[in-house]
Amino acid sequence: MGIDASRSANNRSKQQERRNGFRNILCENLERREVMAGDILDLDFRLLSVAPNTGETFSTTRSNTLSESPRELIFRFAGGDDVRQSTLRSGIRISRSGGDGVFGSAGVSSDIIVTPEYLDFADAANRRVVVARFSQPLPDDLYNVEIFGVDLPAQGINAVRNVANDPLKPRKNGTDRDSYVFNLELGSKITAIVPQPLNRDANGTLSQDLDTIEVYFNDSELYDRQISTGDLAPLADPTVVDPRFYNLIATADSVSPFDDRVFNPIRVTFNPATRMASLQFAGPIHSLGGSGTYRLRIGSDSPVSSVTNPGTVPFDVPGVDPQGFLSGAYNINSGLPITGSFSSILEQEIRTVANALQLDFPGSSQEPGHRDIQEDRSLRSPDVIWGPPNFAPDADPEIRTIRYNFMENQAYGVDTSGRRLFTSISTEQKQRIREVFEFYSRYLGVDFQEYSGPTAPGIERPSAALEISSASRAKRPTQMILLPPGIWSSSMVLNLGTMPLDSAFRKSLSAAKSSQITPSPKPVRLASLQPLCTK
């Protein structure tokens, strides 16, 4: 058996040798070849790009327009060597047309050289990126950025060179520089406003235009020649002389726009040489709306909220929960296409309509740190917290809303002669009252909301309201709680007659009656008002 196995192995070995020999005859070794690939490097010293710090890289084939003044320009160079720093100031020139949009002698005004505050490398490790940084915003104008590749001694120009002393090779053959032109289009700004200006006549006499306001702009492109309102009739006036774009508002020394009165000039004259618009009104400015504070709005013809245009903002209350789907989203503007500006207030809240959440004891009794605090029955006195009926806690699962006002423009009572009495509450007193309500809101669990007007619309209870005024001790209406003098400077009263409150809540509001508040220019420490009830 061993001899037969040896012969079989020898036969297999010989067969394998014959196969390998046959394969060697069929395979022919080819000549060894190697292919080498590589880029043809352009080692010429060139400018790759110029770009502002915001916006796109400047193009050489289309116009470049910027709507924001750049703080810096970034120059990127290419070549075998770094840029020589000493050639930057004399080889890079930035100029603007001077307002006429034309460079050179063909323009009306002379070109203005713009000198960067910083012109050097962006990074010491990369000496092929140069930054030109300006000390102040660039004005609205047409700009030309030139990077020279030749020396022009007559103009004080030396070519930008690399450390090997090779000059810049311009992008276009036959030229001596690379140029990038960009137009800086900024909105016009107001630099000064002079109400009722003084004028000096030729003989030195001073006169004052009491019906005039002068407005100075930083841009003369508002119109190309002097023009006044009505000069182009029957065509429409340019906006720079359209009286609708100038609104003089008498504020009545208040922050509310609903007592403002708006006055428009009867004539506007614009002079592009001085960049000044002269607004002439129907009469002396101080007699239009009386003495006080005026506000001048320029640049928009949209309606201004005022006495004649209250401009109330509508409330929109989405009625259906979108439930996280776009199909259930609420349509603003009643689903109509939005073509202009409008205002709307969306008001919505989370409330338990049915099956109120039981939040008396949140969490598990087995949680670490949990304490099962027993109810203090002593707090159920009818004179302390809850009051009737049955001395039970508030059964309303929602936060109660109570509105209040300061009785402005409405009488709080009459005097002995039958004359109506009005509040004399001050702004500081109003602020102290708001702080008091904020204090009670924290401890009572109710939401106090301030409103203005003679009626109280309410939320949950339409008749729920507090009326607050500054009244004389000599004569005040019934059902008013008198607060002590002090920081109030006079007696303050809370009219509770329009609101169904329990006796305990009335007592809590009169807590300040037994407290003496020392007059002080600083805000009252609300902690001195002891909370008589919590919720």
Image: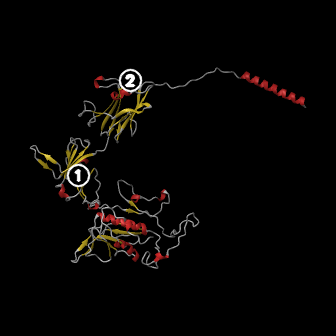
Residue 445, image x, y percentages:
43, 68
Q: Quadrant of residue 82?
A: top left
Query: Based on the displayed image, in which of its 4 quarters is residue 11 positioned?
Result: top right
Q: Residue furthest left?
A: 203
Using residue 40 as the reference point, say whether residue 305 is left or right of it: left
Under circle 2, the secondary element is: loop
Residue type, mark 2 in image: Pro
Residue 221 or residue 255, whichever sits in front: 255
Q: Badge 2: few (under 14), some or many (20 or more) residues near its Cα, within 10 Å?
A: many
> Is residue 146 depicted above or below 199 in this figure?
above
Which residue appears farthest toward the top when viewing the image? 31
Q: Position of residue 531 (x, y in %)?
A: 41, 70
In front of the other: 449 or 8: 449
Residue 475 vs 179, above or below: the answer is below
- Rendered residue at 18%/51% (across/down): 196
Tags 1 and 2 touching, CB below 8 Å: no
Residue that label 1 marks: 243
Q: Position of residue 25 (x, y in %)?
A: 73, 21
Q: In the picture, residue 273 is in which quadrant? A: top left
Q: Is residue 60 visible?
A: no
Residue that badge 2 annotates = 167
Of circles 1 and 2, the one toward us is 2
Q: Amino acid at mark 1?
A: Pro
Judge whether residue 362 can be spotted in this image.
yes
Which part of the image, by quadrant, shows the C terminus? bottom left
The percent position of residue 278, horizontal first and vertical second, equals 20, 48
Q: Quadrant of the N terminus?
A: top right
Sequence-first disc among 1 and 2 = 2
- The residue depicted at 49 percent of the width and 76 percent of the height is 377
Above or below, comparing residue 447 to residue 41 in the picture: below
**Which mark is drawn over residue 184?**
none
Disc 1 residue crowd, few under 14, some 14–19, many 20+, Cα 10 Å: many
